[in-house]
Amino acid sequence: MDSLNNALSAIKNLRSSVGHVFEVLANGVQAHHGDDGRDSKFLVQFQELFNNVNLNLREVESVINGLTPPPAPFNLGHTAALAQETTDERQALYSQLVNSYKWVDKIHEYSFLANNILNCNSLRRSYISYSNKRGRLQISSCNNTSPQHVDKVLNELSLNSLQTNYKIWRPFGSNAVVIVNIGRILKAAIVFKGVMIEWVTVKGFDESLDVDDLWTESRYEVFRKVQEQTHSAMLHFFSPTLPDLAVKSYMTWIHSYNKLFTEPCRRCGKYLYNALPPTWRDLRTLEPFHEECKNC
Amino acid sequence: MGVTVLQPYSVPEGQTGPQTIEFLAKRLLALGAVQASTFIVDCETFIPNPQHGTPKTVHVLHNSEYPASTFAVLDTGTKQVPLVADALFDLLMLKMAPAHTSKKQTKIESKGARFEYGDFLIKLGSVTMAENFKGILLEVEYRPCVIPSNCWELIRELLQGFLGVSIPATIPPYFNTPSIMSMNHPKSSEIFNPNHTKQNDVYQPMDTINQYLEHFGNFRKQTMLSGGTGIGAPLRS
Ligand SMILES: [Zn+2]
């Protein structure tokens, strides 16, 4: 890349020196050449400039010889099609290209900042570290298990429970998305990365939940609350050393929501608090608590 | 579509219907509920003209929660046949005038304010028949849940909380009737299961209509027992 830059600047120098020669020639003999022997002085000046041109030309030649021709034509992707249409007005692409360039630039900047901030966070669950030296992702084994292994873990789970059914999808390559129906109470979509749980979406039994739309929230307050609780439990159960066990305990825990509406709070003995049933399940005993009651 | 439970509320002695409704509305607002528009459920009963075959009564109901639908229940005396149609059904009933005539004086409706409280939907209905106030009918819907037996306790606690009265622990009798759904259920084991009642089925809009029909029937009976309609008189029970 450097040699290409050198070559370009050498060409620029050559152009400017040639331009200078023509400029001097066009101006002809002028007052500053004096009265005596001004023709010879002009000639000397011209020769000097001409030598410059020669020097620059030689430099360009040597730099160009130093360049290695690219092994294959550059792959320009869709931009190659730009050459097909020559009228600027009909393309209207320039401003869009500038915009997208700006966006990409911003994404770089923000992701760099985000990376710095996330690196300070001790709650980090994945072992991804971005190293500048290598410039590539290093993924630990817990995120990078074979799909067969994940299937095996999930199949063991579905054999153990009757009221809960599991459906495994792989819309994003090898990573699994599991849609779980818990009784006739709720549906949950659990997004895996390897055998690690990455995201959970909780919805009501009568709401639609499919793999194309994992991010819209439930229209019911109670399931939005349960989703929050499933996320904090996800952090609790995470274990990089025993990932299979972590998933199994998490599934056991989330299964306890099959009594979401039928069990009163263990602390206050009531079903409702602020119009919500007990949305928290104790991580160890699976006992139901209102969010407000769990810490007192 | 959640589970809906209807609860009649008797007007306390010395108070009028509107006063009681206002009192209950204030209680709801104090709990943190917000009023969200109004509602109406109406019911018109068509009785057959004797010369046209077997006598079958047809109840036609509308629920503002399902504005595009007309609900009809064909009552043979021993069996009730439910039907959900679109609003054009009303015009069809007019065409059937020779066979069925409407008993205008028994046209009954429940209407009033609609409140949202978390995931609950609470409706304070004042029931009127032929413009006469008959009583108060509360509707509580718990929207996230689809199985009545699962959320009856929740609804009961809510009702007790804001009405300040004790509600029987057992689910209303309507939910103990054998489920029609179980007859068509693909799992054959459940067809002959007498314990499979409506409370364990997925709740349907028709269940709300059936409950209204049941309660409207009770209000009409009370009118017949008390011997006519006292104009605007608060109902005692
Ligand atoms: Zn509590």
Image (cartoon, rainbow, N blue to C red):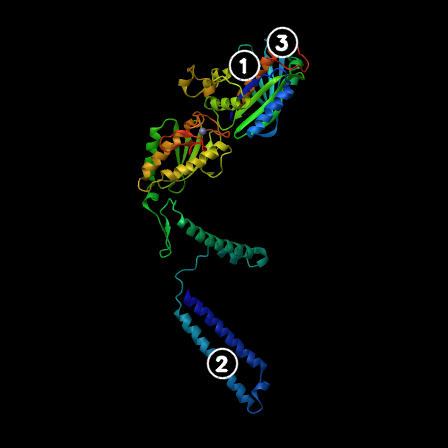
For the N terminus of chain A, the image quarter is: bottom left
Residue at the location (63% across, 9% down)?
A: B226
Q: Secondary structure at mark 2?
A: helix
Instruction: Using a 10 Å C-alpha cutoff, classify the residue at mark 2 as few (fewer than 14 neighbours), some (14 to 19) or many (20 or more).
Output: some
**Alpha-carbon distance for marks 2 and 3?**
122 Å
Judged from this view, the residue extending furthest toward the front is A296
**Residue located beneath label 2 in the image:** A50
Residue A57, how many percent across, how many down?
Answer: 45, 75
Q: Chain of mark 2?
A: A
In the image, which disc is placed on residue B212?
Answer: none
Q: Is residue B30 above or below residue B7?
A: below
The amino acid type, in three-letter code, at marker 2 is: Phe
In the image, which disc is placed on residue B80?
Answer: 1
Residue B112, how many percent across, how many down?
Answer: 62, 24
Q: Nearer the viewer, mark 1 or mark 2?
A: 1
Q: Secondary structure at mark 3?
A: helix
**Alpha-carbon distance for marks 1 and 3?**
23 Å
Rendering quarter of residue A158: top left
**Alpha-carbon distance for marks 1 and 2?**
110 Å
